[in-house]
Amino acid sequence: MRIRYLLVWVAAAVCACDPEPYDVVLVGGTVIDGTGSDRFRGDVAISGDRIVAVSRRAVERAGAARVIDVTGKIVAPGFIDIHSHLDPLLRLPGAESKVRQGVTTGVGGPDGGSPWPMGAYLDSAAAIGVGINVAMLVGHNAIRRRVMEMDDRAPTSDELAEMREMVRQAMAEGAWGLSTGLVYLPGAFSDVDEVVALAEVAGEMGGVYTSHLRTEGLELLAGVAEAIEIGRRADLPIVLTHHKVVGQPMWGSSERTLAMVDSANAAGRKIRIDQYPYTATYTGIGILVPSWARAGGDQAFLERLDNPTLRDSIVDGIVFILVNDRGGNDLSRVQFALVPWMPELEGRTLADWAEMRGLPPTMETGAELVIEAMRRGGASAIYHVLDEADVEAIMRHPMTAIASDGRLVQPGEGHPHPRWYGTFPRVLGEYVRERGVLTLEEAVRKMTSLPADHMGMSERGVLSEGMIADIVVFDPETVVDRSTFQDPHQYPDGIDFVIINGIVAVDDGVFSDVRAGRVLRR
């Protein structure tokens, strides 16, 4: 019997010393593990979809299916984009514009907008295969619109119960939390009590709450306070999503909003932030129209325009927004991005359109052109209304994760915001290498373990043994965004390898549509 036990022990010891060959070994690189710790030279080994070795010594290479020399390159966890507009996913499942930035996981359904029903959508995405790992939030606006259409009122008790049940259903089908877009319709018609009631359901089921604030301009501080209050009353973590300060009258206010975050966290709340590294926003042209004017939907809006008194009030409201908020008090700060009814406007500004019409570039002219755009079906635009000092202050905050707020895109589609192509390389090239706003270790933390913590993703975001093999390899000397506001359809440089669930999706800078991603259900 003793001999038998001895033979078993010897066999186990031999197996332990002679492991199966690795599938991929990254050798000679500099490891930044995502925790904020100092970098070190090390090898990383992958078997299947897991990281099985992160070693300061050379790992065994014999028999490995592939050995990749990454000397001089940074090896880091794959980037996690927790504010992604994944609306075109079923049309662009390869997600090339994300993958080529080093993004391995994207969280969709932000700003109150999401597919419904959630389960059917996630099933469809899984069936066709996806290029990145996909997680989804359930959107308040999507739910409210189905239950209450575009009504500007509080829900009845039955309607609120129905919306709560829809949140519960979405969470059960895999959503990671609730998102709101309180500046958008119909979310702008809701009050705090309604949002708290829905957020409570998400919190009870382990989810988070992400908030596009009700206002990011003149009433920014009130918007931050409201989000913090929702998190407190609903008792769940919140993310101030794409946190920014809109409009010159409020520039510099990030000092106060960040102090509010610190104060709330010190009081025991879990308040987090995400941010994109640009001084321009992007959304539909309807953001320039007062919410009350659009209550009831498009037809009701058009009818109000036919009423001279109401039309004057609408024009005044648009002028106010153009001066104090998204217009930046300058028509040249509103740049058209997607204009199906007049593609030649894409990349041009409201000022350009006024000039084309032979009109003076006044705010009143701008208001009339916005109304015309709305009559013709709307448009999307880029709004150059942020200040670099606020961008840098928010970026430095220890609770700020990097996120793109970017939509999946392919070359030739409209005139998108450059964040759709370049967010993560821009931080690494511009804000780390060129400006020194962040250290490289801190920037990687803000793209990996920090967003993973924001969302509660336990198997991604850190480069360590046992974690899922989502990995990016980049050149710290050359990584850079190429997409610009003038010429946006350009992929970044310096992202050499992207590995998703153990499969190489970018190979020495070359993208392959291998659909290595997974649908992640909470």
Image (cartoon, rainbow, N blue to C red):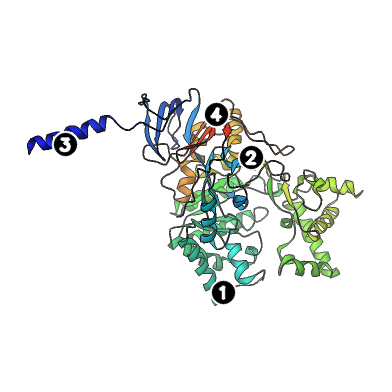
Measure the alpha-carbon separation of dots 2 and 4.
Answer: 18 Å
In space, the residues marked 3 and 2 are separated at their CA atoms by 56 Å
- Labelled pair 3, 2 in contact (Cβ < 8 Å): no
The answer to which of marks 3 and 1 sits earlier in the sequence is: 3
Q: Which amino acid, mark 2?
A: Tyr
Cα–Cα gap, marks 1 and 4: 53 Å
Closer to the chain start, of discs 2 and 4, is 2
Indicate the position of residue 267 as horizontal and vertical percent values.
Answer: 44, 54
Q: Quadrant of the N terminus?
A: top left
Q: Callout 4: helix, strand or loop?
A: loop
Q: Residue at x 49, y 29 (%)?
A: 74
Q: Which mark is residue 423?
A: none
Q: Are marks 2 and 4 in contact (CB under 8 Å)?
A: no
Badge 3 element? helix
Nearer to us: label 3 or label 2: 3
First along the sequence among labels 1 and 4: 1
Q: Which residue is mark 4?
A: 508
Tag nearer the camera, 1 or 2: 2
Q: Are marks 3 and 1 in contact (CB under 8 Å)?
A: no
393 or 296, which lies in front? 296
Specify which label sits upstream in the sequence, 1 or 2: 1
For marks 3 and 2, the one nearer the N-term is 3
- Between tags 3 and 4, which lies in front? 3
- What residue did someone put label 1 on? 159
The structure residue drawn at horizontal position 64% and vertical position 63%, both measured from the top left corner, is 188
Q: Are marks 3 and 4 in contact (CB under 8 Å)?
A: no
> Does residue 103 sit above or below 372 in this rendering?
above
Q: Residues within 10 Å of mark 2 (few under 14, many from 20)?
A: many
Question: What SS does tag 2 mark?
Answer: helix
Return the disc, 3 or 4, that comes first in the chain's sequence: 3
Q: Nearer the viewer, mark 3 or mark 1?
A: 3
According to the picture, the residue beneath numbered tag 3 turns out to be 8
